[in-house]
Image (tube, rainbow, N blue to C red):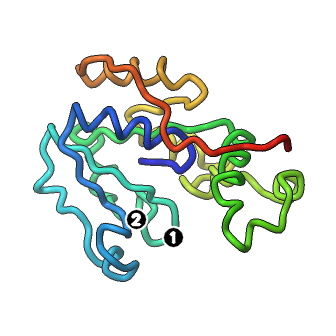
Amino acid sequence: HHLIKSGGNSILSVIQKWFKMEIDREETYGDKSRFIKYKINHLNIFSDTCITSHFQYDGVFLHQRYPELIARKNEFRIFIFVRDPLCFRISHYYYTRHEAENSIYTLEQVLSCDENWISKLIPCNEFNYKEVMDKYFFIGITEKMQESFDLLADLAGKKRIKLPFANVSEKDDQ
């Protein structure tokens, strides 16, 4: 589960050395309706395969798109890296501020009006977060990226590999 602005591109650059990658993103299908209609057939997925996607909006949340993978927790191992919500929001601000609708706001304005975006992207809330997070085989922490990734390598029986830094947003003095 590739959570945006949480080190996913760095992780993807390395796990493709471990697994055959199946990219399940809207861009791969050409349009949103086609993406929602078609998904990777889990019957064609083997232990050397990793599906990756953002799963971050209604209709394609992980539990909606691949409920059979969640139900078969012992056969399919789902992992995610999460980030401190403040660091996440700051990173996302800098990543998207060049877009017209975001360029008029300062970082302070964005931080003062935003809710916890991570809980909306997974999705979970204060009442069901434990149940939702328990569906994951592994939850890494972006602020402890290499340490978390090494632990994932050990759990998956894979070689430890040094992670590069990818997709880092340029920041200013805000």
| Picture disc at residue 24 | none
Pointer 2 residue: 64
| Residue occupying the far bottom of the picture | 33
Q: Is residue 36 left or right of residue 157?
A: right
Three-letter amino acid code at disc 1?
Asp
Q: Quadrant of the C terminus?
A: top right
Q: Is residue 47 left or right of residue 157?
A: left
Q: Secondary structure at mark 2?
A: helix
Tell me what residue is drawn at x 12 percent, y 56 percent: 43
| Picture disc at residue 58 | 1
The quadrant in which residue 62 appears is bottom left
Q: Is residue 128 above or below residue 155?
A: below
Front-lying residue, 142 or 127: 142
Q: Is residue 1 above or below residue 156?
A: below
The quadrant in which residue 16 appears is top left
Of marks 2 and 1, the one in the foreground? 1
Three-letter amino acid code at disc 2?
Gln
Cα separation between marks 2 and 1 = 8 Å
Q: Are marks 2 and 1 in contact (CB under 8 Å)?
A: yes
Residue 2 placement (x, y as % from top left): 44, 48
Tell me what residue is drawn at x 42 percent, y 67 percent: 60
Tell me what residue is drawn at x 60 percent, y 49 percent: 128
* Few, some or many residues within 10 Å of mark 1 (<14, 14–19, 20+): few
Residue 171 placement (x, y as % from top left): 72, 43
